[in-house]
Image (cartoon, helix red, strand yellow):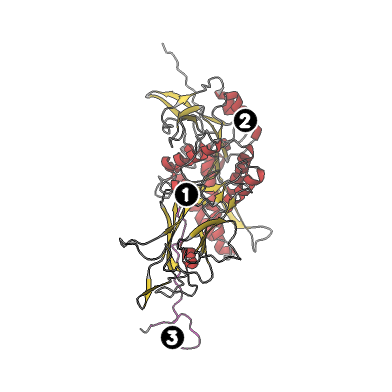
Amino acid sequence: MSTAFTRQLASQSGVQLNPLRDMTDGYAPDNSDQVFGIIMRATRGRIDKPFRVNRGNFQKKLGRGESLRASALNEAHIHVYEALQKGAASAVVQRLTTSTAVLSTIIVTQPELPATDLQFAVAVDVPVDKPFLLSVKHLECYNDGIVVELHADAVTENGTPVANRQVTLRLRDKDRNTLYEFVGSLNPDALDDYQQSAYLPDVVERTTDNVEVLVGSGAQIVPTSNAYGRDTNGRAKFAISPVMTYFAEGSTTYGVPDFARARDLLQKTEHDYAYIVSGGSHALALLSALAQLAYDTNRQFAWDVPGMLSPGAAIAFIAQLNFDSHYCQAFWAPLKSDDPLGLNGKVVLGTSAYNVARRCLRNAQTDANGFAPKNYPIAGKNWPLDRTGIVQIHTPDDDLSDLADAKINPVIYVKYNGGGKYVFSDSLTCAKTAVSMKKLISVADMSSSIDDWVTRFAKEALQLPMEVSVKKTDAFLKKLFKDAKTAKWIVPSTEMDGEAFQYVVQPNALRPADRMDVSYSLKYDGTNRQTFVTQTLSR
């Protein structure tokens, strides 16, 4: 086929077609504000980096969970399960471990004749002085182990069965649910029909980064192996291991270095999230680490003051942390309720993850410009706690003012005209102020979203000519703030002459060649926390 153009025209006569110029690109909100991050103890999951969990793969990724009677650390499992059921699209989980955790490798060997059955063993390292068939390293670290299965079809030469290097490798959990299945060759030079490597380690690497496979020198499945051929009913014969316990969790007594490592991994992950939750943890070091993570990442951090504490004890608990940040929001739920997972009886559970899940559900409902109703906090009559079997164990009355002064949001029974409900009765951040709008969760939610959008666009405008960068950023901010006003996030301000926003984009006065300054002022809509009612008797 001849073409009427060339891509690079030199001295010759002709037509050069330049690459398409796209002037339609712009900003489109993603669903990261329907996702939360958490650091937690789990019985399954990678320990070297965060991973995503959703409602469909919750049990596969995190396991069945364990009783709170065994350890209070297991509460986080319930929080994630409930949050995924109540509105969160997914969770980004960083699993907590200590230096005593040991991830071993599953070694598959083929014994010398006359033995016929493949042998499976666990070793810390791949053997260097002994022949082996395969080594399998499962990086998802199941405490309850996995099962390895291996099969090779029968191959004949001149009517005689011969060894085969083409195999099927399966990994299953202890309940025999299939985790992965790979078909590849034990021959390093093998190619598939598309001339891509068919070598089993390469096939695994293209499929997932959760499994690592090594092949021993000259590995093959011999005809006498229990992994070779088919049985009398025509079914493929698999060599099946027992449940291989290849991961030892070690100590669950976590220290500051363990929390710091987990915090750094959750910060550096490629998975995005808009909220951070505590998972009901009462560890002051972890709560402090997560508060710092919230500041460093411009994310909202919802956490739980222990619900079994009295109002006075709850105030003393939060005082230890000395948080002064609008990124942090504390919830105190003096309630017993049925365990959503059914592993325990009635238990006292935190509600911070539940609150975040409802925020995620709210954020899924956007206007024509992509703005969610974040000016509506998750509090009050419209967002009740719908757990079953709720029993309130503390009833604060005169303490409510003290709780508000301490920046604690009670989750308690409140009576309305249509009846009573268990609700988030307040929506305060941990910012130590009585006047500033930083004390309102809705303002913290909206302002952090605006900052995220602005800084992400500013990054897109880097490495452009200064005049172009200023022009593009100015146009972006004008539309963004007009859309925010349409969504009722921001409202007219008397200090800005009736405008809801003001902004400036310009080259820096001292370094106009390579530095651009962006500043903006916004008047966010507030939240009605207090209503004063007066009735006057008239004659």
Q: Who's the residue at 58% across and 48% down the image?
A: 297
Q: Who's the residue at 47% across and 49% down the image?
A: 61
Few, some or many residues within 10 Å of mark 3 (<14, 14–19, 20+): few
Q: Name the residue that disc number 2 marks.
A: 317
Q: Amino acid at mark 3?
A: Gly
Q: Amino acid at mark 2?
A: Phe
The x and y percentages for residue 424 are: 48, 31
Say which of 516 and 122 sits in front: 122
Q: Earlier in the sequence, mark 2 or mark 1?
A: 1
The local secondary structure at tag 3 comes to: loop
The x and y percentages for residue 109 are: 51, 62
Say which of 223 and 352 sits in front: 223
Q: Who's the residue at 60% across and 29% down the image?
A: 406
Q: Nearer the viewer, mark 1 or mark 3?
A: 1
Q: Earlier in the sequence, mark 2 or mark 3?
A: 3
The local secondary structure at tag 2 comes to: helix
Task: Please tell me whether residue 201 belongs to the stretch shown in magenta.
Answer: no
Say which of 232 and 492 sits in front: 232
